[in-house]
Image (tube, rainbow, N blue to C red):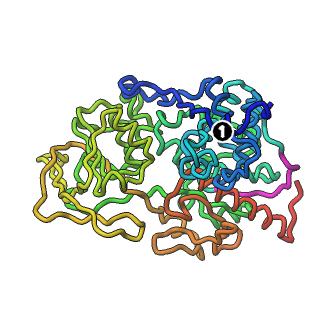
Amino acid sequence: MSGEISNKDRMQIPIQDMPEQEPAVRVRNFTEVPTGYPEVYALTESKRCLDGCKAPCIKGCPVGIDIPAFIKKIEERDFIGAARSLKKYNLLPAICGRVCPQQDQCELVCVVAKKGASVAIGRLERFAADYERMSGLIEIPEMAPPTGRKIAIVGSGPAGLTGASELARLGHKVTIFEALHRPGGVLVYGIPRFRLPIDVIDTEIEMLKKMGVEIICNAVIGKTLTVDDLFAEGYEAVLIGTGAGLPYFMNIPGENLCGIYSANEFLTRVNLMRADLFPESLTPVFLGKRVAIIGAGDTAMDAARTSARLKPEKVTVYYRRSREEAPCLPREMEHAEQEGVGFKFLTNPVRFIGDDNYFVNGMQCIKMELGEPDASGRRSPKPIPGSEFIEEIDTVVMALGFGVNPIIKETTPGLETNKKGIIIVDPATGKTSREGVYAAGDIITGGATVIKAMGQAKVASKAIHEYILSKSTRVTA
């Protein structure tokens, strides 16, 4: 079938845009914004993938998906086969198809992108995964015979879920320990439902359970149990995938006033605890008329777009650099602007002002200018003397990045970390300084992407498997 279309003809096919809700409609709901490819769009887009090329996109994928293979399945109308091809490498394709920055990874090195728009790999990944889920034809992946070996995973975010799927496939008995009351980690508390619907996450987690993975919630490792306790209970290896959920603040006057949130708290209240449904949901969230979001990463865009759906009069993002330096995905900023979010670049808060009841009602800012590049390669912002001004605001969300919670470090003797608390590992194996303890995801990077966390978990899982089998003591199944 593929021979019917020459590569020259494939290069002439325009990229297929994904339909999405209109901004005026979607800003009034939490339903997913992109509605997904219709079948005809997916078929057309799949024909843009060239035959017989070297496929650098595979190396561009942190989990090494055979991208041409699954796209060819779509072109051949074997949509279930496409999904199963994806799941050989990644058990969470419906999630990755939605939240991974493909434009910086597989799509960046796509051969087609040399003369035009890349093949829409992420959209096709989502299409195949959604087709399988909605068809009801999801199958448990092929599993190795049980080994009888017990492995504990700390955290149920992208790294933990991936590690669990990889190790369960290899026949090990896997238990995930999750601190919150439902599994999913940052996928459920940090990413809004209009970007990642909860049923997509739940489907992937349900698959893990069918593979024999046990998930224990409300278990804070470092409080409920320690890593050493897990070994005492018979686990032969531990994979730490607790992410980086410790919020950063600016340490400026007034930052402790009421009405000032970390993005972590704000998004957790809405995404996980459904504060947007209060009083039907028991968790409230205070939101005033004029909301200020500090920062311009993806988390800031999530907070801004979530705020806009809670019907304030005004939402404004303040960022100390220019638009060009903003670290968020371009499509997220575009969506925010379409939904009425305003932006003030080269602007930085220096003080928050409160009323007599200790609620924030103002923010003193200073204008910035860009100087020489800093260590990250971006031009350093410098304040312009005498440019201070006051903004009237009554809610602030601080979205300045995240650090690592020190609880595991403080309760695990001999676990080596750097000065920021990030666990030090051998990048080739994910092995930490503690025997039998491995780590993956934001806990070893301080903050990265979902797919990179998954890639690191695959590396660590392979090393754990080899470590377990190399041990002299054998446990019968």
Relative to 424, 272 lies left or right = left
Return the residue nearer the eye: 168 or 334. Answer: 334
So how many labels did they put on this image? Answer: 1
Return the residue nearer the eye: 335 or 246. Answer: 335
Residue 101 inside the magenta-drawn segment: no
Residue of label 1: 204
What secondary structure is marked by label 1? helix
Return the residue nearer the eye: 285 or 313. Answer: 313
**Residue 338 placement: quadrant:** top left
Q: Position of residue 304 (x, y in %)?
A: 34, 41
Q: Position of residue 173 (x, y in %)?
A: 77, 52
Figure check: 221 above or below 123 = below
Q: Position of residue 111 (x, y in %)?
A: 64, 48
Query: Residue sitting at 53 percent across and 64 percent down?
Result: 445
Q: Which residues are magenta?
A: 143-153
Query: Residue sitting at 62 percent across and 41 percent down?
Result: 121
Residue 146 inside the magenta-drawn segment: yes
Q: Amino acid at mark 1?
A: Glu
Screen quadrant of the N terminus: top right
Figure check: 258 above or below 98 = below
Residue 73 visible to an observer of this rendering: yes
Q: Residues within 10 Å of mark 1 (few under 14, many from 20)?
A: some
**Residue 72 placement: quadrant:** top right
| Most frequent secondary structure within the magenta stretch | loop
